[in-house]
Image: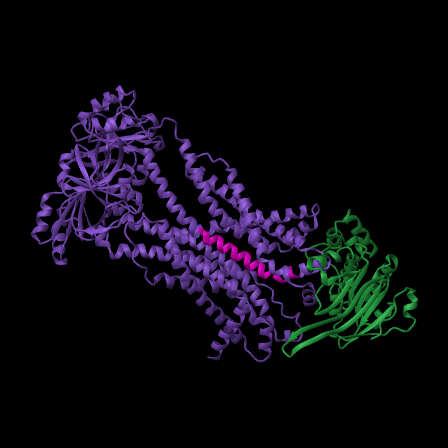
Chain colours: A green, B purple
Amino acid sequence: MYMVQAQKLSKRVASPEGTLTLLDAVDLEVVAGEACAIVGASGSGKSTLLGLLAGLDAPSSGRVLLDGVDLGTLDEDGRARLRAGRVGFVFQSFQLLPSLTALENVMLPLELTGRTAPGRTAREVLARVGLADRLRHYPSQLSGGEQQRVAIARAFASSPKILFADEPTGNLDQATGERVIDLIFSLNRERATTILLVTHDEAVAAHCHRRLHLAAGRLRDDSGPGADRQLDLPGAAGENI
Amino acid sequence: MRIFRLSLLGLLRDWRAGELRVLGLALVIAVASTTAVGFFTDRVGLLMGRQASALLGADLAVVSSDPISPGFAGNARGLGLKIAETVTFPSVVLAGSKTELLEVKSVSAGYPLRGMLRVAQLPYGKELATRTIPAPGTVWLGPRALTRLGLRIGDKIKLGSSLLTVAEVLAYEPDRGGDLFGIAPRLLMNLQDMPATALIGPGSRVTYRLLIAGPAPALAKFRQWIDRRLEPGERLEDIHDARPQLREALDRAQKFLGLAALVSVLLAGVAIATATRRYAARHLDGTAVMRCLGATQRYVVWLHVLQMLWLGLVASLAGCAVGYFAQQVLVYLLSGLVAAPLPPPSGFPVVSGLLTGLVALLGFALPPVLRLKDVTPARVLRRDLGQLPARTWMVYAAALAVATALMLWQTRDVGLTAYLLSATSLTLAGLSAVAYALVRLLRLLRAHSGVAWRLGLAGIARRAGTSVVQMVAFGIGIMLLLLLSLVRGDLLNEWERSLPPGAPNQFVINVQPEQVAPLRRFFFANGLKDVDLYPMVRGRLLAINHRPVDASSYSDIRARHLVEREFNLSWTVRPQPDNRIVAGQWWTAAQYGKPLASVEQGLAKTLRIKLGDTLEYRIADRDLSVRVVNLRKVEWDSFRVNFFVVTPPGLLNGYPATYITSFHLAADRHGLLQKLMQRFPNITIIDVQTVMAQVRSIMHRVNLSLEYVFLFTLLAGLTVLYAALQATQDERTHEVAVMRALGATTRQLTLSLAVEFTAIGLIAGLLAALGATVSGYLLARHLFHLHYHVDPRLWLAGLIGGGAGVGTFGVWGTRFVLARPPLQTLREFS
């Protein structure tokens, strides 16, 4: 059962020097419950790949199936509906809404999918990330680590099937970053969430079952031969390119 | 010179980037609103200046309420001057079963000496200029008179004792009516027919004019000759002091419309200030690089100031063009109030428009732009450096200076400017406080609402500053329109309601003494039992306490008018039931025939007359001196006959008197007026309803023109919203992208935007209704002394107008935000 499937995924953008190929016919399969890291140098197109897989942008060519649904057949709203409740996000720059309190930020995805008692659930998740006493604070009143913990709470609040994380420790100091990674992976274990994580930090990537390297628009499997077996899942064979 | 080129290039680049559009738009609206008013008043002013002699119908005129001594005309002829005579008075005309009060002017051959009459075959038909006057036995009727009486050319009318034939439609007469608002239906006739009508008796309300025209030296000689021969009550009018009322009306219109336009300028200023802050923020990086490459602070400042100047010039010129077209609508709205076709405008409004534009732009835009000189070059290395803190006091100080300068220019009156400024500041402070409190209140709502609602309401709270500015800006625009449309109507209706039922609605004047007894019998026979007739003797006030009164010794315009006109004196045994003695004693029977006077307290105040003062009058060649023994308060609203000055009976017996009365006539008994006219053809009946309808129609037109000017205020309010949208665009794009990533649909996002803007609009509408209600209440209580009832329509119109208007425009203005792919935005914000 694939959670994410990418087939011949390409992204090209126009630039003054002609067409620039960011991603070049990338294939990728992530099974449910797997934690997969995409590593690569800055500017290698990691975030672009993540965005395409999550349906935040449309590819130039190729196909993405998210939870079995072909994103290419959906419009912007259709993709949004697909994400709601199924997909969680953690961004490098947190991307909290500055006009909402911590509690309101975490309630957002719950309310968007019309869950009952969003306030209670949000409180519970915020307590789980250790921010029970910061509910009424606005993002600007929180430290970077605290903001990222709110973002993690928001990502997990709706119990998504898959979490996309884009450099989740990029803006944090090392100690805080480690605590945030611990939090993400312990929540991942508790809730059996699939994780697709973009990072340039090898230590962060080491937490994942599988490590893929993106360079020159192409993806290469970096993980050792035993990596897949740790998961013991069928169909999780490495996609060597 | 390089700096000029660079600034022009920068302007073009910024314009293409869309950064200057709000600034430009705000300026165009500000300049358009002032120049629209400017062009209009300029054209009316030019008409008055260039055609002054035509407006007088002559070069010089002797004006009096008594027949002008024939010697004057003789002397003028002797000097080789051309002369003509006119006699003007109001009279009721009978046509079949219809009656109408007309302004009658009978003229001698040669009239008008300057300018030309224009006639037509049909009301409002094709006009032809003519050098003739109505032939004896015929009249020319104005189009309004013609339509109201249901007449056509060739029909007959009864004027006094004469039967006259309608020969032409009178389309235009140069020296029409007393003032700008003279819209009474008109009739022109031949002076030879006058005696036969028997309309003019002693004491009638008549204006005699001797028109004189000719070469300047002869005119000068005539002036010299007549100067010492003018009697009190006779005055000389020339083209320079022609139509003082018209000049005064124009002056008032200029001030009033000018101030109305100024509201738009100040609101546009708010938009300019908002837009410039964003402009300055976006130029931080570029400026830092320029400083890094060696540009001096001076250079940086000049570059941006020059850029602003170019923009100001171009936008102001565009504003002038828009203003010119907008002015045509103003002319249309006020057509009929200005009699003659208007000449094309001069260039002056363009100059004043450009000045207004530049002053507003520099005043509101300069403070943020000047801050750019403080950008540190180190920002090139670290972008977090040199976020310029807004020096808000500078913004406010500059705005206040600009507002003061523009108001002073508009009013040329320091006291009025100070009053207006403090009233405006108070209103703004009050509205802002209420708006801020409401924004705080919205937070309570947030906890109990859905996601789109919460996001929308949170947006208002987060941008509390800009939200309050938008609410107040729109609130003021809507409030002004509410005041003009609903509150004005409410006050007028309230006043009409406050009149006692059965208040007199017909006035009868010009009743001759020998008609008093038959008229009483007529009324009695027709069921009107208690109709009293009051004597009226016309006299001119010569002196107060032996000091000659002179119009020029009063600064008050009303006082001047009062002194220039003749007074109607009356006598009575008892004061009218609605009169109250506020000082002194009413006379006893023993004092009948004594030279005493009772004066209305308002008049006493205006002319500075005190108890015990001596008033000297000239009545029909005789002088009479009376002592003020009491002051009266009069309820003018009662529509009863009342007089400013009353004497005891017996004193005025020997003087020529006419009688006046007022009575209430039920709506279904109007046929009685015709019987009255047939029995007493010389009397004049004034229907209060008709006069009120005329007043209403004038008010309506003036109001429409003001509402039109305030439309610019609403437009300026929209640019404030537009500027605020631009200033918050980055923030909103980010919010939308995050929401999209979390799975929000377009519907949910649109709803949250709709909630935010509708709430802003609702609060603006609430502020507007609140402001309009408070203003209405203050006007009713303190100015008109009426009860004020809160009008629910005011609140409904404010809320619906504000909510729907701002909601629609806000959602429309942010639609681009929804169109961007979320990934692009999220990366820009990381």
Q: Residue at x 82, y 56 (%)?
A: A130
- Where in the figure is residue B357, as x and y percent of width and height? 44, 62
Q: Is residue B715 magenta?
A: yes
Residue B403's x, y, as percent? Answer: 46, 57
**Which quadrant of the figure contains the C terminus of chain B?**
bottom right
Q: How many marks?
A: 0
* Foreground pick, B359 / B480: B480
Name the residue rendered at 44%, 55% in the picture: B262
Q: Which x, y percent locates residue B382?
A: 67, 73
In the displayed orientation, state which residue is furthest to the left.
Answer: B78
* Majority secondary structure of magenta residues: helix
Residue B224 lies in the magenta stretch: no
Q: Is any part of residue B785 visible from this angle? A: no
| Residue range of the region highlighted in magenta in the rendering | B710-733
In the visual, does A119 lie left or right of B65? right
Residue A182 lies in quadrant: bottom right
Name the foreground residue: A53 vs B788: A53
User: Residue B558, relative to residue B827: is it above or below?
Assistant: above
Q: Nearer the viewer, residue A29 or B794?
A: A29
Indicate the quadrant where residue B44 lies. Answer: bottom left
User: In the visual, does B487 lie left or right of A226?
Assistant: left
Task: Answer above or below: position of B549 versus B409.
Answer: above
> x, y (%) of residue B743?
72, 57
Tell me if residue B618 can be seen: yes
Give the quarter of the image for residue A154.
bottom right
